[in-house]
Amino acid sequence: MKKQIILFTIMLTLLTAACATANKPEEIAATAVPISTDIPIPTNTAVPTTTPTAEPSATPLPTNTATLEPTATATSTPTATPTPLSQIAFAFYNGEANAYQIGVMNANGSERIDFPEAIRNLPDGYTPEWFGYGVDFSWSPDGSRIVFGFMNDGITSPRDPNGGDKSFQLAIMDADGSNLVEVPLRVAFNRYRSAPVYTWAPDGSKLAFVSDSDDELYIINADGTDLSVVESVADLKLQADYDGYSSVFAPSWSPDGNYIAFVWDRNVKSVNLNDETITTIIRPTPPPTTETVNEYLVDPRLTWSTDGEWIVNLQSGVFLFQHIPPEEVIQISSLVGRNWGWSSDGTLLYGQVTDYDDDNYPTESLIFNMADMSLMSNPALGSGDYLYGFSPDMMQMVFLSNRDGNYDIYVADADGSNVNRLTSSESIERIIGWSPDSTKILFASDQNDNNDLYLVNTDGSVETQLTDTVVTEFLAQWKP
């Protein structure tokens, strides 16, 4: 019996081993299931991964808010300080030295610097008929440099027929007066503006000008290097088959930096600076032949719209034409135009026209709406008012008017409402211009028996005299 039990145990053991061997594939299959059921494990793993990602994502909100608050507070402190708003460059006449000079100062009148290098001595014994003739300067578009120029000493007035060769010597310097370089060629003269014929590249890196020696278009770096002639423009003279006016004039750089428009034989042309191809945009109608409308009154300046699509030209009236197809041409006025410019957003074009066939020379300010291509009325402006432009934020307009018996500065909302008189002196204010933040008006006045620079708030609340010197400030420009 004992032997039978032992034999039965052995047989049971063998049978169990055989069954284990027979079920092995099922065990593999069963083992594979947990691997398959482990899929939720990465899924579960992703859940905590997603959760921490969401948490940092939400966390930066208060973090950034906390960071912005002190930053904004710290920045707003100097920004809120009204002085200095910016810098102002200016020109002045020093009677003691009988010389013109250029300077800069903060917009509150502090830290004035008169540049000794930027000076033009006038001929001995000569006193200017009026200040500013033969003087020009402008900021580079980026505000880093100033170009200035003085006419040669032979020029004394715009009515002097024997006043020399009518050319300018230009020089470029940093805004603090350092790194001054002279343009190696003398620059042609715009008699209407009593200014040299040049234009800044929109990024301030280059200057284009017309040489007085050969009437060609040149480009030079703002640091005085790499002077070069625009060859395709120079070739125009070779193509001319007549003895007419065939020099380049009134260059104007496009806002995108790719073109320079210019006047040639009273045609308006543009040169593509990438391949130097030249396009004739329009030939305005022939200039007036009446003796009253002479070269003093024909201003060939070209002014681009902010988007580079349109150019305004003041030859033989006020013309507006497209630089791109279909190259539409619009004559805004047949009268002589002066001081035309664009609003900061490019939606409005404005300036004055004068009827020189009328012995009283009546002048009117016009506003042209680019939205519907038509002149628009403005209730704030009357006959004889001089519109000086719209504020940079397009909320207001400033103009000069004698409606109260003397020419003074007025502001109004851009639609002509809420007219407000800002000045009330017996002198005539000049060189009127907006501050970059649209809160103040810069002007020159001789109300204290000497031409000085002033600021006035656009609400008329505060008038500040910026200069009080023995010299005579007569031109000024805000830093861009």
Image (spheres, rainbow, N blue to C red):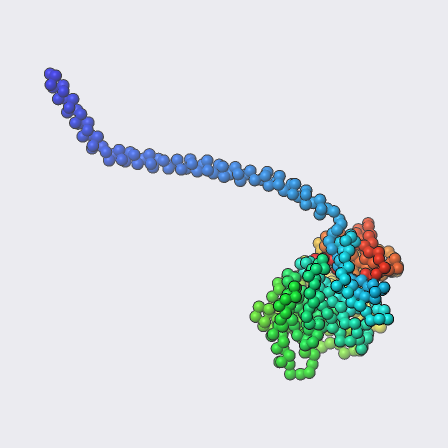
At x 73% / y 76%, what residue is drawn?
287
Quadrant of residue 255 in the image? Answer: bottom right
Q: Position of residue 228 (x, y in %)?
A: 62, 71
Q: Position of residue 25 (x, y in %)?
A: 24, 35
> Of 107 and 408, which appears nearest the observer?
107
> Of 410 and 69, which appears nearest the observer?
69
Q: Is residue 130 left or right of residue 196?
A: right
| Farthest bottom residue in view | 242
Q: Position of residue 443 (x, y in %)?
A: 80, 58
Quadrant of residue 160 in the image? Answer: bottom right
Regarding residue 429, the answer to whether it shows in the image is no
Which quadrant of the rendered structure holds the N terminus?
A: top left
> Of 278 and 388, which appears nearest the observer?
278
Q: Position of residue 34 (x, y in %)?
A: 33, 34
Regarding residue 115, the answer to whether it shows in the image is yes
Report the label total. Answer: 0
Quadrant of residue 281 in the image? Answer: bottom right
Q: Is residue 30 left or right of residue 130?
A: left
> Of 477 and 319, which appears nearest the observer?
477
Which quadrant of the rendered structure holds the C terminus?
A: bottom right
At x 18% / y 30%, what residue is drawn?
18
At x 63% / y 42%, what residue is drawn?
68
| Farthest top residue in view | 1
Vertical order, 457 against 4 (above or below):
below
